[in-house]
Image (spheres, grey):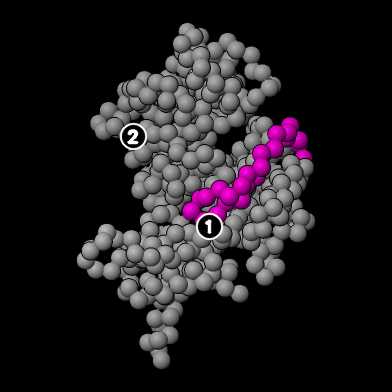
Amino acid sequence: MTQIRTRLERGRGALGPALGLVHTGRAATRALLTAELGVTRATAGAVAAELEALGLIRVDTRPTGPSGAQGRPSHRLEVAADGPVVLAAQVHADGFRAALVGLGGETVATAPGCMTVPADPAHVLGEVVAAGLQLLRTHGRTCVGAGLAVPSAVAEPEGTALNPLHLAWPAGAPVLRIFTEQIAKAGITGPGGRPVPCFVGNDVNVAALAEHRHGAGRDAQHLLVVASGHRGVGGALVLDGHLHTGSSGLALEVGHLTVRPDGRPCHCGSRGCLDVEADPLAFIEAAGRPAGPEISLLEQSRDLLSTEYDDPAVRGAAHTLIDRLGTGLAGLVNVLNPDRILLGGLHRHLLDADPERLRAVVADRSLWGRSGSVPLLACALDHNSLVGAAELAWQPVLDDPLAVLGG
């Protein structure tokens, strides 16, 4: 009896790791699941069956091998297409976007919202949650969590936005508390009517998590992500599969690296920071173009690079920002020694415009860049901050699926 109970506990203890393997695409078959977990085939089969009973994955038993092949083909495993979802949201300088995201990082539906983000966080977060509630009603899916990405350093575990420099929010705004209150006010509940767990994170931090699990950062041990979205520059580091946020969530504020000591004043009080020297507004101004209100600064920058790169002013602006960005990346390479660097937002488009120039600047200005090239790649996921916010919300399920869905 003791042996049976031990096997049962071991199998249940493997539910979370098994779900994580299917979630990240590392166990597409039961044979791979067996090998990755280091369990018997029978245990892997029982684990897969329980995850399927919870509505999280689908086990496809149809033969897939070629006709006449030796042995029995392994069952295929994939996330359940009609399974539960999380509500994910991102707030940025030009508004917000809400989405329903399933396991595997699959976006089920999105709802963009363009608005001037007011000084009261509760106003925009109320709009975010209302959009998410409408998506849940339209698609009729079970919600198991909610995650929010914001353009600010986020203190842990309080969930306060310490420096939302490009929003009108006050420093130290209790974003997690407000988000949780808005979710409860909207009546969004989880399985069994239980409260939905809520999470908040810095937008680039969670984007790095998403890229590591589902995008261009897969298999990297020391992944550095640097990105410029609508305003400012952010960075994040994933070490051995875990997001490095420092002692209180404030690590990797790379936007405040100085790349021009005599440069323009930064919101942080210094001068010449990446945040103001290598973001979309800096690019548009360097190109001599007005920052029009019709579209976001990021969209305007992307359009200039894709349609007017032959214009000497646009090309010169791109080279200027590439040199500034490369200087900042070189310093990060010297300190962090990453095995891969991903660039997002405007920086992704600068890499596409002149990859050799950017790689040369990083190599010339960094010790490790000269001794061994660090791969510079573009982020692969659309709306990776949204997917990353969803990853925060999925984590309790990945940790213990039975505790969240088994009641």
Amino acid on which disc 2 is placed: Pro
Residue occupying image coordinates x 27% and y 59%? 66
Residue occupying image coordinates x 56% and y 59%? 82
Is residue 114 located in the magenta-colored stretch of the structure? yes
Residue extending farthest to the bottom is 1
Residue tagged 1: 81
Count the marks. Answer: 2
Q: What element carries label 1?
A: loop
Q: In which quadrant will I find the N terminus?
A: bottom left
* Label drawn at residue 375: 2
Q: Relative to residue 277, is residue 38 drawn left or right?
A: left
Q: In which quadrant will I find the C terminus?
A: bottom right
On screen, 134 above or below 342? below
- Find residue 41 and report its horizontal and vertical position in percent: 32, 73
Residue occupying image coordinates x 43% and y 69%? 48
Q: Is mark 2 on a helix, strand or loop?
A: loop
- Find residue 241 and report its horizontal and vertical position in percent: 41, 52
Q: Earlier in the sequence, mark 2 or mark 1?
A: 1
Residue occupying image coordinates x 47% and y 8%? 312
On screen, 79 above or below 100? below
Residues packed near mark 1 inside 10 Å, few (<14), some (14 to 19) or many (20 plus): some
- Find residue 136 and report its horizontal and vertical position in percent: 68, 54
Q: State the extent of the magenta-drawn residues as a range.
A: 98-120
